[in-house]
Amino acid sequence: MTANSPILSFASTDLILEIPTTVENQLHLHSQSFANSTSYQAYLNELCLGAVLPWLQEDFTPQAKVWPHAAALSSFWELVNGTAITVDATRFILVPSENIDSSELRVPQEWVDLPSWAGDYYLAVQVEPDEGYVRVWGYCTHVQLKTKGNYYPGDRTYVIDENQIITDISVLSVAREFCADEVTRMTTVELPTLPQAQAENLITRLGKPEIITPRLAVPFPLWGGLIAHGGWRQRLYEQRLGLPEQHSVMQWLQSGVTQIAAAMGWEKLNLQLSAAGARSIEERQPGVSLSHQLAIAGQSYELLITPQGEPNTTHWRFELRNATMGAAIPGGFKLRLLTEDLQPFPNNEDIATTAVEQLYIEVALEAGEGIVWEVEPLPDNYDREILKF
């Protein structure tokens, strides 16, 4: 085991993992990142993740990582209990609880019925904050949850009894190695995308922190349709914390990117653009762009957003290029822009039919309009976001 997450002992077939002191020491820094009603839920999830992730990295693959990315965790934990970790192409869902009763595993519906959230394996984790350890006491697959578990509409959870899941954690690595063709995940039904006006109304309504459990305040198709959209989930989280607009491109260009945007990978670039026919340094015009580094299939790329023309322009250039000097974008890549509610519009896509130097889209946007960007193949750690102009 790693020094960060040693096994303290085995109790029966359970896996006992120490909570690293580094995780405990960092928790006070995050206390302001949640509404009061959800801070303890986030606390348990962070302790759970801090103990279990190093074990997965040690016993399965060093590339095991949080899904979609670490900067998004706060927006998940504010709304739903649980954390997703990807191990190669497999997704684990950690379901922490302080309950010492291991007679059943309760999984929030979001982790089961949202296609983009569903996992392959669900790990039952008892967290002991005062004792400094977690106990991984069982696991089941998505198929088992759906076929052998019971759905409880009162708290919107799938519940599966202990005798229907595997309580010997050592079986998990064996199953992944020797039962690679096992069907772990059932097909789930996509929820329709909400109209933007409806999403805005839901964010305003559920963004009030006095609503303790927003996930139970509206029918699941509405709730699921809202939070399955990464940009809307993030906005709901920010609304519940009373934060000002965090994704205004104009503000980023004028004042620098916000802390939240920087954590998501954005940075402001100050460039010197050569004026046509410039003969001296005085004729060079300063330019500003926003940059987002992307990793796709082991290669580094850069997404740039640059205003076009006058300072108060409504025209913007979105450009994708290889981060390696002189390297191309392979054929088959796509750069796409969508409205906030994921609708296409004329000339919203650029496709590389062969290897090209860059992909770009130029678009005119009204003040306050939102845009969602997409790249195919999907970048690592991709989570939909809404950029406001």
Image: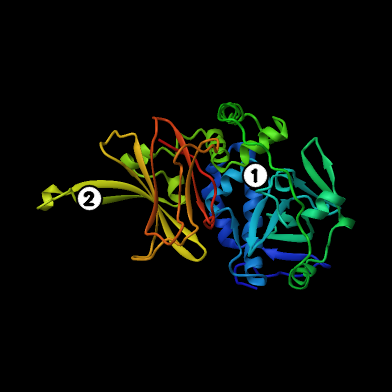
Instruction: Say which quadrant the N terminus sits in.
Output: bottom right
The disc placed on residue 362 is none
Q: Position of 50 compared to 288: left or right?
A: right
Residue 164 vs 106, above or below: the answer is below
Label disc, if present, on residue 273 of the rendered structure: 2
Of the image marks 2 and 1, the number of the one nearer the N terminus: 1
Q: Is residue 2 above or below residue 34?
A: below
Q: Is residue 216 above or below residue 174?
A: above
- Of residues 130 and 47, the one drawn nearer to the viewer in this rendering: 47
Q: Regarding mark 2 in the picture, which secondary structure is present there?
A: strand
Residue type (three-letter) at the residue carrying disc 1: Tyr
**Dot 1 lies on which element?**
helix
What residue is at 81 percent from the left and 67 percent from the top?
11
Q: Most extreme residue toward the front, as rendered?
A: 353
Viewed as shown, does residue 90 lie left or right of 283? right
Q: Are there few (<14), some (14-19), or many (20+) residues within 10 Å of tag 1?
A: some
Marks 2/1: CA distance?
A: 50 Å
The residue singled out by tag 1 in the image is 40
**Quarter holding residue 134:** bottom right
- What amino acid does circle 2 point to? Leu
Provide residue 331's location: percent of width, then percent of height. 47, 60
Marks 2 and 1: CB-CB under 8 Å? no
**Foreground residue, 202 or 193?**
193
| Quadrant of res 384 | top right
Given residues 208 and 112, the one toward you in this image is 112
If the image is split into quadrants, where does the C terminus sit?
A: top left
- Where is residue 243 drawn, in percent x and y? 48, 35
| Count of numbered badges drawn on the protein | 2
- What residue appears at the point 80 percent right and 45 percent down from the top-left corner? 158
Which quadrant would residue 120 be assigned to in this image?
bottom right
- Residue 356 image point, x, y percent: 40, 59
